[in-house]
Amino acid sequence: MIYVTINDESFIYDVHSLIKAFYPAEDIRVIPDNQDGPKDMCPKFAVYAGSDLISVKECVSDGYSRSITISNGLYDDRPAYKSELKRQLYNALTEYTGHSLPWGTLTGIRPTKLAMNCLLHGADEAKAVSYMKDYYLCSDKKAHLATDIALRERRILHGIADNAAALATGYSLYIGIPFCPSRCMYCSFMSYPIATHTKAIAGYIEALKKEIDYVASAFGGRRLDSIYIGGGTPTTLSAAQLSGLIGYVIDRVDISTIREFTVEAGRADSIDREKLTVLKELGVDRISVNPQTFNEETLRLIGRKATAAQTIEAYELAREAGFDNINMDIILGLPGEDMDDIRYTLRNVACLKPDDLTVHSLALKRGSRLAEILTESKDACDKLRNTDIDYETAMTLTEETAASIGLKPYYLYRQKNISGNLENTGYAAAGREGIYNILMMEEVQDIVACGAGTVSKHVAIQPDGSALITRCDTHKDLKLYINDIDMMIERKKKMYA
């Protein structure tokens, strides 16, 4: 446990996030210096934020401290002061540890949005790169990556609508199916094992239909840009259930303007020829077939029942069914894997040549079985926490693999506790980029989300061109969602009104 004291409680989250990035394997507690901590607490750092001084002191060993005087009055400008505090804390930690972070002071999930805002305010590519490097202390490589993706996203979004206000007049529809064949060790998403929840499916679909009726009524005059059915694993539903649900959406919602219709068929053990035929006939034009890894031992360890051979078979079935936009997900840093395992997975990806490849760096998510195990036992922690991977090299290998099959990066996001302090990146062939991914990540239009554990977003463009974003969620518990579906719909009505 690393204890940190701070004199200004409003910066606790920012200080915690940044120190955690430098010490990912440690538990971090940031405590106001006017409060008593645990009896055995020995602070490692003390952070002082004052009206004309920011200082960071290392409290364990003698001789280290760092402080900087800043301009008078900046303390009253909280956003500017927070940025300066994070820069000074970052510099102090870099000096103290001898390490730097690829994304500098950034700990949020949307670094490309910062580069995008810079471009939208008239900066050229070079200025956007400099901004990411100078203001957020990003590495040269990550500053260029964020800017390059922002430029590509802007071109794709421009193909939908030529300005922010026009983009915001459209909306996207997300439908969550919270069932899976089994629960993967690393997963924290809404997921109920299908074998023990079969009887709940009919009631769940009826609740979804009520939400879809609301969408048809409230958004009937608006342009629908994309539909994304995710989960869980949507293809745990039977072919008849998929046909009934998607058919209902098509009957009730005007889909004449959609640019993309995605269904996650992520688990190979949930895919068969009949389901793929149903999806294709109903107009689904993008699916995911997600191996995560092609190493059999890892698949068994993380609880994915499908073998690598089944994933390849499912992928080939999807090609035979006529799908020409197939996404694959892989995860770097799965328990027990080393660089050779990653190279093996990438060779298989290169042979299959998906149209879209999403590369995740493993994130230890609260609520996942993996996170629970790592906190239960040091022996388990030593066995499962992956220390044999050079994540920068692994990410470079994925970039090279993607480029070798004609895929370029088009969207990016980060997560808390992400391995190597890196990112998740989507690569795609030209014209095969996941439009919903960009619309959702850049927060440029309403995302109407239906289903248990989903979050809807309302994007309102302000007179100064900025976006005001509000959110509302639905119950995560399956029974509560079904029982309170009318209340869930009322939440959406109030927000979108």
Image (spheres, rainbow, N blue to C red):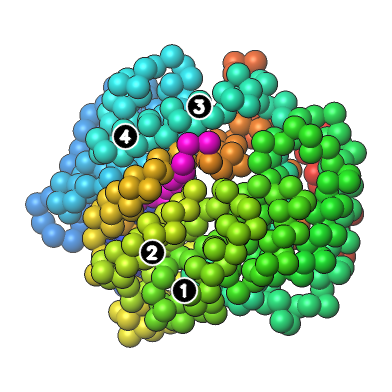
Q: CA distance from mark 1 to mark 4?
A: 35 Å
Q: Marks 2 and 4: in contact by CB < 8 Å?
A: no
Q: Quadrant of the C terminus?
A: top right
Disc with the residue nearer the chain's start (4 vs 2): 4
Q: Nearer the viewer, mark 1 or mark 3?
A: 1
Residue 154, disc: 3
| Residue 115 position (above or below residue 86) | above
Q: CA distance from mark 3 to mark 2?
A: 32 Å
On the question of residue 365 being in view, the answer is yes
**Residue at the (31%, 39%) spot, across then down:** 142
Amino acid at circle 2: Asn
Residue bearing mark 4: 143
The percent position of residue 312, horizontal first and vertical second, equals 50, 68
The percent position of residue 87, horizontal first and vertical second, equals 29, 37
Residue bearing mark 1: 308
Residue bearing mark 2: 348
Segment colored magenta: 421-431
On the question of residue 22 being in view, the answer is no
Amino acid at circle 1: Ala
Q: Secondary structure at mark 4?
A: helix
Q: Which class describes the residues within 10 Å of circle 3: few (<14), some (14-19), or many (20+)? A: some
Q: Which class describes the residues within 10 Å of circle 2: few (<14), some (14-19), or many (20+)? A: some
Residue extending farthest front: 320
Disc with the residue nearer the chain's start (3 vs 2): 3
Q: Quadrant of the N terminus?
A: bottom left
**Residue 464 falls left or right of residue 221:** left
Q: CA distance from mark 1 to mark 3?
A: 36 Å
